[in-house]
Image: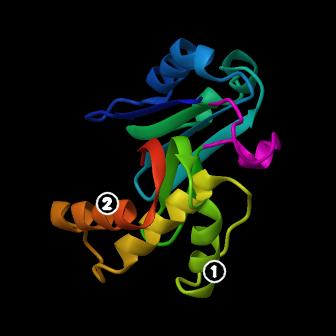
Amino acid sequence: MCGIAGVVTQGTAVNSELFDALTMLQHRGQDAAGIMTNEGSRLYLRKENGLVRDVFNADDHMATLRGNMGVAHVRYPTAGCSSAAEAQPFYTNMPFGLALSHNGNLTNAEELKQELFAEDRRHLNTESDSEVLLNVFAHELMQRGTLRLSPEDIFAAVSGVHRRCRGAYACTV
């Protein structure tokens, strides 16, 4: 069990809203917490093991999480390990710079890891099925072959994820 949140606003910073969302979702996971925000072409990330109140210090961390859109996560480990490297959100810079917060389990994660490496030429850094899900989605987006995504491209990529990924999951990207 984990808690996930995603916020997009019209020009206002989302860091406080994501912090509040994670605080309200703390009961869903006490192992780790993370927030990734976007401002322009930059992604800003803070994630670490611990409770939300301990991971995010208003003076040091919240001010650096700039932007008007972001995703957040509190973790209760059901797969992988309890390393801070497995705290979410996960991100990949190809294509477009994507961040993902995920709750659930992929029942075919091991098979997908092999496919991602051998066929899709994607490298994974953790044992987390969340990183697998992110890379499947990223690969499906790349298959669209466009530099400017349309809603149809995104829906096609999501359909590709559903074709490849088995299990039960929810995510914010």
User: Where is residue 76 shown, x and y percent of the image?
Assistant: 68, 29
> In 3D space, how far apart are the residues under numbered discs 2 and 1 (Cα atoms)?
20 Å
**Viewer-closest of 173 and 53:** 173
**Viewer-closest of 64 and 104:** 104
Q: Is residue 104 left or right of residue 14?
A: right
Residue type at mark 2: give it. Val
Residue 130 in the image: above or below residue 66: below
Q: Which mark is residue 158?
A: 2
User: Which residue is located at x 68 percent, y 25 percent?
Assistant: 56
Circle 1: element type: helix
Residue extent of the magenta highlight: 75-88
Q: Which mark is residue 25?
A: none
User: Where is residue 16 shown, x and y percent of the image?
Assistant: 49, 21
Residue 102 in the image: above or below residue 133: above
Magenta: main secondary structure: loop
Residue type at mark 1: give it. Phe
